[in-house]
Image (tube, rainbow, N blue to C red):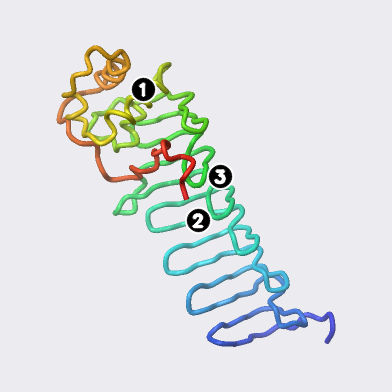
Amino acid sequence: MDGVLVKGTITNNNTVLTGTFNTNHQLHGDDCEKITPYNKKVGTFYNGEFLKGVYTDNEITLSGEFKFGMLQTGIRTTRYAIYEGVFSSGHLTNGSITFKNANGDISEIHKGKFYKGKLYDGSIISENYRAEFMFTGKTLNRCEVYYNGELNRLNKVQFILLCCNGSQCDAAYTFYQNNLLDYSIKQVLSFNYASNGIYKYIMQNIERRPMSDICSPMEDGPIDIFDYYTYDSHA
């Protein structure tokens, strides 16, 4: 039997292996399956290592190409988001994240380049909203926002980007982080920074939008993904 693949099923310690095996009883070939009490892998194996196919457990589904058990290219699906593209150490580095609300509908899409799961160069898209921006470390180099809706329809990330829209984006972002980050839209509008040019710049961006029913930014969505002031410490 040396060098000959054997097809069948092996059960050991609550793990079921089905498909073709090498002489060391490791899954080896296409159309193989490994089922444990915790997860399931279906696809291509090489000397026991899962290379390509679909991984599922109670929390996530991974589909694509794998290396050392980690998704390299493909799709990661969770209850509230779909990550698609190129991955490194389990984090998306280039591609898109489609966020879903509690009803399963698409609420927001992040597309571009990511650092440890955080978008730093690309776009955020949702209904009537599009932001194009680029970070270098903690510096916001570019920010262009297009939105024709009401402020109360924005989540915190979208609102911050709107405040930073334009040629003075990094100065506006720094001012917002240092002075306004923990406050609602109503509170931001009520502060008296009239003598500060950057605050006036932020207010001009805000005041271009319809002002009815001003309230705190909607908390539904990925509101913490924009915390680039701790950019270098993200896990």
Q: Which mark is residue 172?
A: 1
Tell me whether the residue at label 3 lies in contact with that at label 1, contact meaning CB atoms closer than 8 angstroms.
no
Tell me the crowding category of disc 2: few under 14, some 14 to 19, or many 20 or more residues within 10 angstroms, Cα based.
Answer: many
- Residue 140: x and y, percent? 45, 27
**Which residue in the structure is indicated by mark 2?**
76
Q: Residue at x 39, y 38 (%)?
A: 226
Q: Are marks 2 and 1 in contact (CB under 8 Å)?
A: no
Whichever of labels 3 and 1 marks the residue nearer the N terminus, that label is 3
Image height of 59 relative to 126, above or below = below
- Residue ID for mark 3: 93
Q: Residue furthest right?
A: 2
* Nearest to viewer (mark 2 / mark 1): 1
Q: Residue at x 52, y 37 (%)?
A: 112
Q: Residue at x 43, y 37 (%)?
A: 228
200 lies left or right of 94: left
Q: Position of residue 65 (x, y in %)?
A: 63, 58
- Seen at 59% across and 60% down, the residue is 70
- The CA span between labels 2 and 3 is 13 Å
Task: Tell me: residue 183, above or below residue 47.
Answer: above
The secondary element bearing badge 3 is classed as strand
Say what secondary structure mark 1 lies in: helix
Q: Is residue 95 left or right of residue 105?
A: right
The residues bearing labels 2 and 1 have C-alpha atoms spaced at a distance of 34 Å
Checking the image for residue 102, the label placed there is none
User: Is label 2 in a helix, a strand or a loop?
Assistant: strand
Label 1 amino acid?
Ala
Q: Amino acid at mark 2?
A: Arg
Residue 230: image quadrant is top left
Pick the residue in front: 142 or 172. Answer: 172
Residue 235 location in percent, x, y?
A: 47, 50
Q: Nearer the viewer, residue 226 or 208?
A: 226
